Image: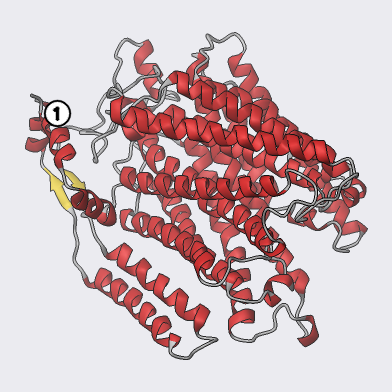
Amino acid sequence: MAVSDKNSAVTQKRSIGAVLWDYLTTVDHMKVAHLYLFGGAFFFILGGIEAVIIRIQLLVPENDFVSAGFYNEIITMHGTTMIFLAAMPLLLGMMNAIMPLQIGARDVAFPFLNSLGVWLFILGGIMLNMSWFFGGAPDAGWTAYAPLSTTSPGHGVDFYAVGLQIAGAGTLMSGINFLVTIINMRAPGMTYMRMPLFTWTTFITSILILFAFPALTVGLFLLMFDRMFGSAFFDVALGGNTIIWQHLFWIFGHPEVYILILPVFGLFSEIFSTFSKKRLFGYTSMVFATMLIAFLGFMVWAHHMFTVGMGPIANTIFSVATMAIAIPTGIKIFNWLATMWGGNVKINSAMLWALGFIPSFTIGGMTGIMVATVAADYQYHDTYFVIAHFHYTIVGGTVMGIFAGLHYWWPKIFGRVLNETLGKITFWTFFIGFHMTFFIQHFLGLMGMPRRYWVFLENQGLDTGNFISSLGALFMSIGVIVFIYNAIYVWLKGEKAAADPWDGRTLEWTTASPPEHYNWKQTPLIRGLDCLWIEKTEGNGKMTPAEPLKDIHMPNNTIIPFIMTLGFFISGFGFIYQTENKLWYIALFGGMAIALLAMLVRSLQDDVGHYITKEELKGEAK
């Protein structure tokens, strides 16, 4: 029996407590990725249930399935959960798992920070959803516009402000971590223009996170102080300005759309190239198009505010800048088509998601040009047309990308290949359901159906469209359930995946599936773009080491990130409830004390990690 087989047998026999402790204390990028993926999947299901409740409520005219107040809470939590707690963490999970492998790194630059980031996301998300059990969830919409958010009764919006502060801090840490990793930890020969597209999009997304999230942080701080400490940043009667919230939110909010879509562009580039058996067409133009999208993404935030009254000059500038983003996005679409042109295209479940993405996202882009037209936007604004446009970009782009990435990288992350038949059932039910749900909503919006409304009336011509839309949501739900069954099925009965199940082109397919926690015994030497494909075409089939076999330095596991986050979590409750009872200051300052004490221990602790000796590495190879 090989040593690796013995290890896997030992792993299977480990107690649940030992596994939980391992994940609580881990700093390994692959296990941190697992936490992001499991956490993101939980919140994705939660957000999906909220979406189904919305569609049941709008199934028939004048329905009373839920009350008006509860409906406001549901639409607020659906949007907030899907954007902040589902889509982003699922993408961060794939970035964590794959990016270090693609550049030949043993881990991310700051493993401790990586662990802290994932716990901040998980406990921030839990805090936000605790609002359901403490008097009601936030009800001011996922954008939390003032003065609705500042005057909303109860503590729902307080949970929104504090929960997103905690979760957002974790995302900001991830962005910084990924930037430093890609700049400093590339394997020998891995120049910038040899990096896979997914690594490039991770890099550029991290820059967006670094510059966009502070605007949200500032806005949430101001909202928090208005609600909890009696300040007046958004109170017009006391000299405040409600429009400032919209600016702060969308200065973050529009780059956030590209934070969600750029990693997906990268992973689709990998999938099209791998399953077309061709180098990605126009690699250099793809890199610069990504940079241009990110740059222009910061120039267009006020296209969400055309009806606010900024005036024709400001509206025109933001309109033109918005339309300009169609150019680099179009470059990407045509390069993907050109990659497949003349290639040996293999259609499997990952490739199906990629193919379904192109028309879906293109429709979202076309309606984006429509809402970027100022005069027309006065008609589209706050109708279901905007709901349809938004979901064609986020679901037709990001969610389809997440499913594509999971089918493609599941073997590398979890060591199993997902069942192809179940994968195709997932795709077709979800794809058909998605278009049923949201395509009809364009027409509902053009017919005048407003967004965020609890009921619609009879005899307005909206009955059939809403019924079709709700039926589509059922199909999407079935697709997600089939995917969950697929994941559980292959975990219990699936065979162990090969290192390179897809005949891949990039570096992650040179390691075991899943890789050892140090990724490589010897750092590989990179000789060009699609480095594994180069070695295959020259008859090697594996990478040449860039160094002799030597001791590997790795970080130690630690519970400190979890304890630090727990302190912030406790402190959050203190912030929210100190308005009712001053005793809550104990929780506020006590939680901060726990977090600061954990920071102090981390600062004074002389943790130099551990070494895996070359003798151990030789032993594992036997």
Nearest the eye: 302 or 581 = 581
- Residue 127: x and y in percent read 47, 65
Q: Looking at the image, is 466 positioned above or below residue 346?
A: below
On-image quarter of the C terminus: top left
10 Å crowding of disc 1: few (<14), some (14-19), many (20+)? few
Q: Quadrant of residue 139?
A: bottom right
Q: Which residue sits at x=29%, y=14%?
A: 540
Secondary element at image label 1: helix
Q: Is residue 277 left or right of residue 292?
A: left
Q: Is residue 299 left or right of residue 199?
A: right
- Could one spot residue 326 in this view of the protein? no
In the picture shown, does residue 280 fall above or below 196? above
The amino acid type of the residue labelled 1 equals: Asp
Q: Nearer the viewer, residue 347 or 614?
A: 347
Q: Is residue 494 above or below residue 278?
A: below
Label 1, on which residue? 5
Q: Position of residue 154 (x, y in %)?
A: 61, 76
Residue sitting at 90 percent across and 52 percent down?
A: 378
- How far across and how far down the image is residue 189, in percent? 37, 32
The answer to which image quadrant residue 226 occupies is bottom right
